[in-house]
Image (cartoon, coloured by chain):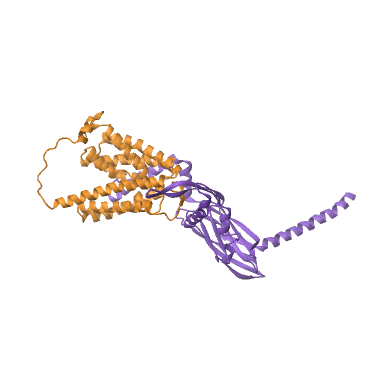
Chain colours: A orange, B purple
Amino acid sequence: MTPLLIMAGIPSTVAAASDSNQIVAASTSGTYAHYRLGNVDFKMGLFLLIGGVVGGTLGVQLIKILRATGSADFVIKITYVVMLGVIGAYMFIESLQSLRKKAPEGRPPEGPSRPSVYARMVQALPWQIKFEKSGVTLSALMPLVLGTFVGVLAAIMGVGGGFIMVPVMVYLLRMPMHVVVGTSLFQILFTCINVTIMQAVTNHTVDLVLAIILLLGSTLGAQFGARISRHLKGDQLKILLASIVLVVMVQILVGLVWPPHLLLGYKGGH
Amino acid sequence: MRQRMRSRPTVVLCLTMLILLSLAASVQAETVTLQVVPPVVEISTFFNGREVTITGTLPAGHQAVAEVMGPEGEEHLMRKGRRGPLWMNVGEVTVSGAPSLYLVLSSAAELLQGTSPWGFQSLKRQITLAGQVKDSENGKFQEQFFALKQREKLYAALPEGLKLSPAGGGRLEVRGRFWIPANVRPDTYKVCLIAVRDGQAVDRQCIDLSVHMVGFPAFFMSLAYEHGLLYGILAVVVAIFTGFLMGYLFKGGGGH
């Protein structure tokens, strides 16, 4: 949402902070629904959340410093270019590969492979804890560090971090999919509550009216989206999403590379 | 008794002077008259800018200039520069002596050109730039500053934006309209109508135009800047409530 707001001309700092507020609203009912279904790993969520609060607080302070030096706009945009570029390209390539793989069916199953370097590294970390709900045992440092990373991004980019958190939980924390969605929503909700309050206190960049308008728009849009998505296959949908992500990334990148109309601008977006 | 006799001429002299002064003042006041409608601009929830009409009169044989000005202050801006392939902010430029709002209208285009004391050319002479800007770049960045303000509609020049018509009694009626943009800062602005003859100001009349927030914007603004924590908590509570409401209405919901 934030990059679209930036494209619409809203200062990056206000767009990011107000979008965090909007995500609080968007993830509230989802978290509650998953909580009732028992799909939230509170233990994992708590570690992620501690990291998220620390990261969010760091991120808000970072934005404050960047605003004072006049670089906040640039840093938010370049972070988007990098994140959207990496994620968009990854999604695009992965979906294309899976579309191609589907043609020749009946591939022989792969044999058991020995633990990867990553798995051995994770096992070597201290403070190993068993997360019963997710059925995994790993170092508590993992969710703490990853939560901090997502918290920093939440403050800088105004994202809940779902698009980073979900693959992180699936591939790096090896959590089962049904717990991933509920737990990531739980973590996102509280990280964004923290970021919203911090941004309001430190940077005065939360626009509550904008956040509510965004929420109403995104909820209504989601209804249309859900209808359209029924007519598309999963991989087609992923390619469509990846294309949108890449188009937005290119648009922001062009804005940074193309000579600006004016060589003077306001500090910190405005 | 003698003292009373002595004081009588003094009283008469004072009275005569008072009458003469008030007559002179009324002649002066009648030289240029000005009305602004609306006299106060309110920024409410759906404020999207506001058109303001100025009407007035001045003696026949004069031209007219109207200026709408905000208070002067210092503005800290960033200049952009290229670093590798990317454009980014590379240094601070401080602009002094620039009004926060400057709208100028005239009854003839030439009144705002050249060495005229009104219009952008005149304003450029009073603005100074400091910081990360070389002397040789001064003119270029002044142009950039005006372009920035014009893009935001905070600076505008409307040559021939004032219409003159005979009003009878040897006077002219002046009419004009200007636009207060949506991003205007709440403040007190000065609207001045100037009677001009041979390129010189003969007389002027100024009125204050107050722009202030009312209703929700005023409430949110004071809350956001004076009670940040309360505003943040309110934003979260409103978001959670709206989230539940939308979830209930659409039986869905999701994250990001």
Question: Residue A196: percent from the left, percent from the top?
Answer: 38, 42
| Residue at screen point 51% across, 49% down | B134
Query: In front: A63, or B45?
Result: A63
Q: Is residue A56 at least partly visible in the picture?
A: yes
- Left or right: where B4 falls relative to A124: right
| Residue at screen point 30% across, 54% down | A247
| Residue at screen point 61% across, 64% down | B64
| Residue at screen point 23% across, 37% down | A173
- Left or right: where B154 falls relative to B199: left
Question: Residue B213: percent from the left, percent from the top?
Answer: 50, 51
Query: In the image as oriented, which residue stretches furthest toward the right?
Result: B2
Question: Residue B196: percent from the left, percent from the top?
Answer: 63, 64
Query: In front: A9, or A116?
Result: A116
Q: Is residue B181 at least partly visible in the picture?
A: no
Q: Is residue B173 above or below residue A64?
A: below
Question: Residue A227: percent from the left, percent from the top?
Answer: 24, 55
Query: In the image as oriented, which residue stretches furthest toward the top?
Result: A127
Q: Quadrant of residue B119?
A: bottom right
Q: Quadrant of residue A108?
A: top left
Query: In front: A81, or B11?
Result: A81
Q: Quadrant of residue A166?
A: top left
Q: Is residue B123 above or below residue A139?
A: below
Query: In front: A168, or A119?
Result: A119
- Number of numbered discs: 0
